[in-house]
Amino acid sequence: MIQRAQALAALSENEFDLVVVGGGITGAGVALDAATRGFSVALIERADFAAGTSSRSSKLVHGGLRYLQNFDLALVREALLERQLMVALAPHLVHPLPLVVPAFDGARPDRLMGVGLNLYDAMSVDRDRLRSRRGKRARGERAQNASAMGDELQETARPVQPEEGESWSPERHRIVSGEEVLELLPALAAREPTSGYLFYDCQTDDVRLVLTILGEAERFGAACANRVDALSLLQRDGRACGVRALDRESGEELEIRAANVVNATGVWADRLGVAAADEDDDEASVAGLDHAAGDPSAGRSVGESRGASELPRIRPSRGTHILLRHEDLPLVGGAIVPADAGRTIFALPWLGRTLVGTTDLDYEGELDHVRPSGEDVDYLLSAINTFFETTFGVGDLAGAYAGVRPLISSGDPKKSVDISRKAELYEASSGMLTITGGKLTTWRRMAKLTVDRIVERDSREAPCRTHEIPLGQGVAVEDLPRVEGVPEKSYAALAGRYGYAAREVLALAAERGELAQPIVPGLPDLLAEVALAARREQARSIGDVLLRRTRLGLLAARELPVQRVADVLARELGWSPQDAAREIERFAEEAEAEGIRADSAAPAVAEGAAASHVREAGEPEVHSA
Ligand SMILES: Cc1cc2nc3c(=O)[nH]c(=O)nc-3n(C[C@H](O)[C@H](O)[C@H](O)COP(=O)(O)OP(=O)(O)OC[C@H]3O[C@@H](n4cnc5c(N)ncnc54)[C@H](O)[C@@H]3O)c2cc1C
């Protein structure tokens, strides 16, 4: 990415077709989509890129098997097709993950789950591709894949394999033996599984996906800066014509002029939107955006002339994840783990650890730092301990995190777990577009929906191109140059994180030998990545590096070498010893506020006032992303 100072200069000097507020996956997607259609684009992010929900997901690029239960079929279908596309566009970042639903004591795997998986398989097939493939197949083979639902034959049908030159397409689910279950879930050895369903979804590193999309947007001319807070909407004749913003580093205000404003602020969307609706109609006026107000419900009732439907009403729902060391709970594939009240959670291998989550509970607390509650952590531990016959306690956790889903309230008191993950686009009478809801997986569709509307308003001819824009560039691990001192296992990790750009990390490590060392001994992330994060990815703090550019804050929360990271950043960012000491202190506060060491998780009572009135029968609502 371009340097922050350079991006800031571009933001204040130019007039843009579009300014995007919010640097999560949604904002990044809108910036890429618009830039690739020829719009000039500015993007500002108040905190760090992906610092909101987009760094706190379950890391799945998936259709969401669970949404089939809610008959959210269109959403599942859309997400499944996006999943397939993401593997093609970013194969180094989005990769297939086998998932297993184990069965024990000779019991048949659950039939209902089999029906759901049949449907999931059927919906994940790209019909155009299937048609052409079928045309080439012999009649007898074709019969094997003919029926979509409820056909037991399908459970043993041959997997649909990609033909030469084709991208990944998921294999059909199938029943596997107990031995195969154990190969994928060695942690289940004590329970001796006898069979299970095997199916596929995809996995990513959510922050790296956001950074990669932003990098591509910049390649098409977008200017993106973090730590720039949209304070107010600029308006001319009642129409949005940019934003007044605050550079949170210098404390200076700037005006970003743009013909279109897109609010992609996730769970903050109603704060930005409502105040924008509170406009007066003075010429070139500035509408106050009261997003900094502590009360999340502030202004929600303020309707604008076109009625409530032009603004979303966000109903945040918190999801908690915990991480265990791979050695403690070894997994090769993911497991669907039963939890209380007939719900399920995931246990997934992720970046050398085991990631367990998630809960799904209405949330009314502070949005900037969302901590895992003690109760959520206990809930996840209890499910894991029961399923794997283990005795993990909070002290065994490698890390933990929580995030809030930007769910759109329909006004009815549904449980958050039942609220659709559908995205919605709102258009205010000022012309500001707000895009929120949705999922990490469906970012491209959300972006398309938004930019299509701008294209329509402008009467332009500019079709969406993001389905054909590669996200970064993959690289074969063996093609990366070997650098003295870099541990062998770091190469695969670098290739997975940066693709071809891993060469830049290695060049830094070659230039300054001390940067060839791992940040945390035994883990693959290199000190050279700290320097690269500051130089190329606008990292400005220790938290930017440990929580987002690398994920060490989640993977190794108890063993973070904060001083080493500060030393590298100090050299890159010109920090004095006093600056570095202050930054270390700031990170300690951030880590505490985020609750990454679950043992310091706030007791549930501290947040109970917010949560208890929506929780039923005392248990968290659980499941998936
Ligand atoms: C626990 C959990 C698990 C999930 N798992 C999955 C999953 O596995 N797969 C999946 O597909 N989806 C998943 N999701 C959903 C997915 O993570 C979200 O839908 C997605 O990340 C939302 O992205 P966003 O860009 O809309 O919001 P965000 O990522 O929150 O981005 C909004 C950004 O706007 C910025 N902002 C706010 N106000 C301002 C302002 N005034 N000026 C400038 N910037 C501002 C914020 O700092 C923030 O960075 C999960 C969500 C949760 C909570």
Image (cartoon, helix red, strand yellow):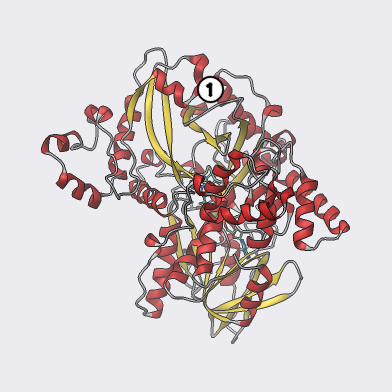
Residue drawn 65% across and 68% down? 3
Classify residue 419 as left or right of residue 288. left
Residue 442 is situated, as x and y percent measured from the top left of the image, at: 43, 53
Residue drawn at (61%, 27%) of the image? 381
- The residue lying toward the viewer, choosing from 19 and 378, is 19
In this view, the residue farthest toward the left is: 139
The residue shown at (56%, 66%) is: 273
Q: What residue is pinned by disc 1?
A: 187
Mark 1 and ligand 1: say if the CB distance to the nearest ligand atom is below 8 Å.
no
When asked about the image quadrant of residue 193, the answer is top left
Q: Residue at x 17, y 44 (%)?
A: 134
Q: Is residue 480 above or below residue 278?
A: above
Q: Name the residue type under label 1.
A: Ala
Task: Measuring from the top left, give residue 250's x and y in whole percent.
Answer: 76, 70
Residue 308 appearing in the image: no
* Label 1: element kind: helix
Which image quadrant shows ligand 1? bottom right
